[in-house]
């Protein structure tokens, strides 16, 4: 009898432990903490116009570099973007949804971390102002249902017909920007901080891993995020420099975390 009671107690204890800490939960709760993300309190230009969208319509992560010193911070990039705006066309805040501070390959500064940028429900300003991409049924419905709207803080937000052109939608609406801080392009007259041909700068293994982790974490929450692209996929630019060569490798790393990207 005593043995029977002990066995029942053990069974109940194990059942409780398994229910509280499932080992193979096919639908884990969000967030799946593959990587921590730092929150930043950004100054904003409250006179600027910006657009809102449901994050669920985003299907692509676009990689960039800042073309600044690798020691620049997310707040530094935000300030650069505020200063890029003009009186007639001000910028609301940092253009990217995420900022990765990380040292170059073989270097030790700065401490690698990912910071939130522009919130995911706000349309970014990174792929190109007048770049349009094919629009799918989900994005079309969001637009027709009035869920992609533009305006100013404390003002009225309305549907902007310029966000759609025929069967295409602005690339910024359908994507998020993930920027790696640093200058990964070669020296040029318009890029004096670029690397010399004898000493190219490449993203470190840690940088590649953090991009893959964040991308996978986003896909687990937003399953439509199936693509990883790069800035000069959309138009002619040197961005994101040598990071472009590592996209395939980043996709392979993401597979190890359970995600498939095109």
Image: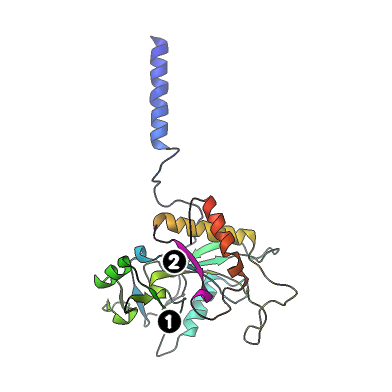
Q: What residue do we see at 39% from left, 90% from top?
A: 88
For residue 130, above or below residue 6: below
For residue 144, above or below residue 219: below
Q: Residue furthest bottom?
A: 88
* Rendering coords of residue 80 (x, y %): 52, 80
Identify the disc placed on residue 254.
Answer: none
Closer to the camera in the image, 1 or 75: 1
Q: Quadrant of residue 218?
A: bottom left
For residue 223, above or below residue 142: above
Real-space Cα separation, disc 1 to disc 2, in angstroms: 16 Å
Q: Is residue 175 magenta?
A: no
Q: Would residue 129 be seen by someone viewing this image from the given angle?
A: yes
Q: Report crowding for label 2: few under 14, some 14 to 19, many 20 or more residues within 10 A (C-alpha).
A: many
Q: SS of the residue at dot 1? A: loop
**For residue 93, side relative to residue 144 (left or right):** right
Closer to the camera in the image, 166 or 79: 166
* Rendering coords of residue 2 (x, y %): 40, 10
Q: Quadrant of residue 170?
A: bottom left
Q: Would residue 112 be seen by someone viewing this image from the given angle?
A: no
Q: How many marks?
A: 2
Q: SS of the residue at dot 2? A: strand
Q: Residue furthest top?
A: 1
| Image quarter (top left, top right, bottom left or bottom right) of the N terminus | top left
**For residue 216, side relative to residue 187 (left or right):** left
Closer to the camera in the image, 79 or 167: 167
Q: Which residue is mark 2?
A: 60
Q: Residue furthest right?
A: 198
Image: magenta residue range? 222-234
Q: Which residue is mark 1?
A: 129
- Of callouts 1 and 2, which one flags the residue occurring earlier in the amino acid sequence? 2
């Amino acid at each position: 009898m005593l043995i029977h009671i002990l066995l029942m107690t053990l069974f109940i204890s194990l059942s409780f432990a398994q229910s509280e800490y499932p080992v193979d939960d096919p639908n884990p709760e969000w967030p799946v903490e593959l990587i921590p993300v730092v929150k930043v309190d950004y100054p904003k230009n409250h006179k600027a116009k910006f657009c809102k969208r449901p994050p669920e319509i985003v299907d692509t992560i676009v990689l960039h570099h800042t073309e600044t010193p690798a020691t620049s911070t997310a707040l530094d990039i935000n300030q650069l973007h505020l200063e890029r705006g003009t009186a007639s066309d001000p910028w609301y805040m940092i253009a990217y949804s995420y900022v990765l501070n990380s040292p170059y390959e073989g270097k030790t500064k700065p401490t690698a971390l990912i910071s939130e940028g522009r919130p995911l429900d706000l349309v970014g300003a990174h792929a190109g102002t007048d770049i349009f991409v094919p629009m799918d049924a989900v994005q079309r419905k969001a637009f027709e249902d009035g869920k992609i709207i533009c305006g100013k803080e404390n003002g009225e937000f309305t549907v902007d017909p310029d966000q759609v052109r025929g069967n295409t939608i602005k690339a910024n609406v359908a994507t998020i920007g993930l920027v790696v801080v640093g200058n990964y392009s070669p020296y040029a007259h318009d890029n004096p901080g670029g690397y010399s041909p004898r000493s190219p700068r490449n993203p470190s293994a840690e940088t590649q891993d953090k991009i893959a982790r964040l991308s996978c974490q986003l896909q687990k929450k937003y399953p439509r995020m199936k693509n990883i692209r790069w800035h000069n996929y959309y138009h002619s630019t040197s961005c994101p420099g040598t990071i472009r060569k590592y996209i395939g490798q980043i996709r392979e790393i993401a597979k190890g975390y359970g995600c498939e990207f095109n």
